[in-house]
Image (spheres, helix red, strand yellow):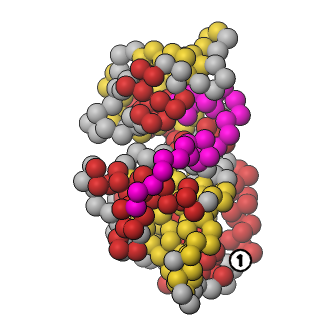
């Protein structure tokens, strides 16, 4: 096969990267789509298509890359093959199953390649020390040894850990206590529960010079809900021709993350960037723009978390989908309810709030 181009997202600091490789194979143009997961240790997802239309190309790229909130750049054949080789061999080393049609990309995993330092290329450009500290704490909680080693002046820092597995940073409050020194009040999820901890980070030129870790303290689910609570705006629509609307809605918005529930399907729209990591208080869900839940009883429930996003979403639905939906009602809640509504198996939001 002849290499045509390759494109990648600069989202490594969030834990995963989207990669597209295009080849010419005789009379066929082949597009390969990889999700490379640094936390899950390997290639997490793979699909390929031959001779697609421009519309399908757009949908597939957005499906893979649209929710990662990162710049997309072109890379060389050597760089693309190295990344598939590097992440694919992680699957083999940690005995994690390779996804999709393995025979289509196994030649890159088996190939003897020259090591290429790709880390800076697949990471975004850091703009502030607070953003850097948030990313470092996120990578530390995720037990991301490679990232810590790359960003540390003291290589022993990469051997430090407090989680049993790849933990998830839920909230991080960053306070500057002196020049280049920061205190973090962190809330995270591990494989055995939720914890809070104080972490001290000293930085210099976007490198870690020291990392100090306090004692972690277990907290319960209610504590986490309280810490992550924010106002949720709910708008309810009546849906006509539910299946047609569902199909067209996802076709128009391929970058949405789709999740099936017992009584409906949920689509999550993420913001186009990861600017929430720049905030002094990082909250994991602050990258969500809108959530759309289409129930089996033909209700569309839309959740937003700020008034500007709500206005934008209301306007978009009215302009694009007025043939399918009719406005019914809207509410404001001090905490999020849409996940509880979906997980509890309700199909009608009015029944849910009347319980």
Q: Residue at x 42, y 64 (%)?
A: 108
Residue 115 vertical placement versus 34 (above, below): above
Residue 258, above or below 172 = below
Over which residues does the magenta segment extend? Answer: 111-136
Q: As drawn, which residue projects farthest toward the bottom?
A: 27
Q: Residue at x 52, y 32 (%)?
A: 150
Position of residue 134 measured from the top left corner of the image (x, y, whole percent) = 56, 31
Residue toward you, 167 or 250? 167
| Residue bearing the label numbered 1 | 320
Name the one closer to the observer, 95 or 58.
95
Using residue 8 as the reference point, say whether residue 186 is left or right of it: left
Name which residue lies at 64% across and 43% down: 124
Image-based side of 315 in relation to 195, left or right: right
Residue name at image x 59 percent, y 24 percent: 207
Q: Nearer the viewer, residue 307 or 269?
A: 269
Residue 159, quarter of the rendered image = top left
Decide whether residue 283 is among the magenta residues: no
Task: Return the residue found at the far top.
Answer: 178
Near mark 1 (Cα within 10 A), the count class, few <14, some 14-19 or many ≥20, is few
Residue 252 can be seen, yes or no: yes
Q: Report x, y in % for residue 214.
A: 40, 15
Can you see residue 324? no
Residue 119 image position (x, y, % from top left): 55, 42
Whether 241 is drawn above or below 199: the answer is below
Quarter of the C terminus within the rendering: bottom left
Q: Is residue 219 left or right of residue 133?
A: left
């Amino acid at each position: 096969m002849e290499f045509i181009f390759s494109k990648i997202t600069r989202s490594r600091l969030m834990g995963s990267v989207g990669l597209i490789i295009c080849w010419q194979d005789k009379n066929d143009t082949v597009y390969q789509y990889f999700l490379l997961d640094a936390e899950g240790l390997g290639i997490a997802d793979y699909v390929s298509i031959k001779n697609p239309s421009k519309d399908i190309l757009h949908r597939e790229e957005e499906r893979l890359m649209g929710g990662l909130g990162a710049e997309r750049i072109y890379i060389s054949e050597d760089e693309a093959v190295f990344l598939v080789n590097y992440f694919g061999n992680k699957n083999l080393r940690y005995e994690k199953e390779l996804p999709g049609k393995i025979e289509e990309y196994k030649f890159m995993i088996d190939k003897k390649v020259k090591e290429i330092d790709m880390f800076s290329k697949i990471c975004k450009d850091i703009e502030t020390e607070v953003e850097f500290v948030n990313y470092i704490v996120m990578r530390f909680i995720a037990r991301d040894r490679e990232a810590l080693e790359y960003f540390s002046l003291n290589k022993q820092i990469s051997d430090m850990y407090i989680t049993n597995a790849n933990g998830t940073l839920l909230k991080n409050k960053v306070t500057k206590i002196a020049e280049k020194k920061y205190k973090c009040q962190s809330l995270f999820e591990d494989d055995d529960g939720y914890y809070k901890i104080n972490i001290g980070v000293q930085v210099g030129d976007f490198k870690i010079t020291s990392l100090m870790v306090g004692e972690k303290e277990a907290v319960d689910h209610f504590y986490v809900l309280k810490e992550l609570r924010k106002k949720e705006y709910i708008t309810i629509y009546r849906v006509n021709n539910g299946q047609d609307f569902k199909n067209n809605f996802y076709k128009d918005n391929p970058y949405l993350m789709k999740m099936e529930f017992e009584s409906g399907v949920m689509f999550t729209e993420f913001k186009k960037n990861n600017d929430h990591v720049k905030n002094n208080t990082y909250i994991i869900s602050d990258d969500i723009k809108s959530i759309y839940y289409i129930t089996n009883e033909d209700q569309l429930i839309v959740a937003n978390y700020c008034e500007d996003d709500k206005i934008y979403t209301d306007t978009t639905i009215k302009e694009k989908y007025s043939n399918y939906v009719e406005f019914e009602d809207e509410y404001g809640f001090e905490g999020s309810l849409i996940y509880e509504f979906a997980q509890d198996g309700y199909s009608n939001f009015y029944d849910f709030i009347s319980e």
